[in-house]
Image (cartoon, rainbow, N blue to C red):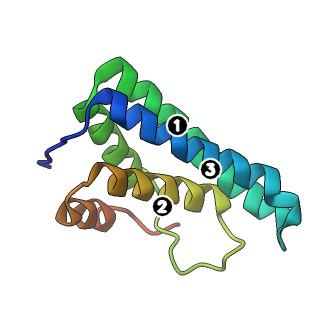
């Protein structure tokens, strides 16, 4: 898959830190939601993905973190359309990766190809 990244490592890491702070706020406000456990697990999954992406970006650079994110995204089971309270970790990871792709301005065609490569949950 071809992609062009215009952000620097520093810009990517800064953006991921911002997303992590939002996810942390969601963890903290989970008890106030209708389904606290699901909401908390979704937010924690997002935080973990953002932390790992930042780690890869700092160690290996922008192109490597995008390759890593695309591979991780492709490896996730496709659970879209399942009830809202099911698979919060998978949905949280998916949400975090899609946020990352939007942040870096990844080409929609590349995102679609990666999404099509995902297998349904067995």
Please, what secondary structure does the residue beneath circle 2 have?
loop
Q: CA distance from mark 1 to mark 3?
A: 9 Å
Q: Residues within 10 Å of mark 3 (few under 14, many from 20)?
A: some
| Of residues 21 and 75, the one drawn nearer to the viewer in this rendering | 21
Q: CA distance from mark 2 to mark 1?
A: 26 Å
First-in-chain label (3 vs 2): 3
Viewed as shown, does residue 113 lie left or right of 100?
left
In the displayed structure, does residue 104 sit left or right of residue 82? left
Quadrant of the image occupied by residue 63 = top left
Quadrant of the rendered image containing residue 38: bottom right
Q: Determine which residue is flagged by label 2.
A: 77
For label 1, the residue is 17
Which x, y percent locates residue 121? 51, 67
**Whether label 3 touches label 2, CB < 8 Å:** no
Q: Residue at x 18, y 41 (%)?
A: 6
Kindly check if marks 1 and 3 are in contact, taking CB atoms under 8 A apart as contact.
no
Q: Position of residue 80 (x, y in %)?
A: 50, 74
Label 2 or label 1, whichever comes before in sequence order: 1
Q: Which secondary structure lies at badge 3?
A: helix
Q: Residue at x 39, y 27 (%)?
A: 56
């Amino acid at each position: 898959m071809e992609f062009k990244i215009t952000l620097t490592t520093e810009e990517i890491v800064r953006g991921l830190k911002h997303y992590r702070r939002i996810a942390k706020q969601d963890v903290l406000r989970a008890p106030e939601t209708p389904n606290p456990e699901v909401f908390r697990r979704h937010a924690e999954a997002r935080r973990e993905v953002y932390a790992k992406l930042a780690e890869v970006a700092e160690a290996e650079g922008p192109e490597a973190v995008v390759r890593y994110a695309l591979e991780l995204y492709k490896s996730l089971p496709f659970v879209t359309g399942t009830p809202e309270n099911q698979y919060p970790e998978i949905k949280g990871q998916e949400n975090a990766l899609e946020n990352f792709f939007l942040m870096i301005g990844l080409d929609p065609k590349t995102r679609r190809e990666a999404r099509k490569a995902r297998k349904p949950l067995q």
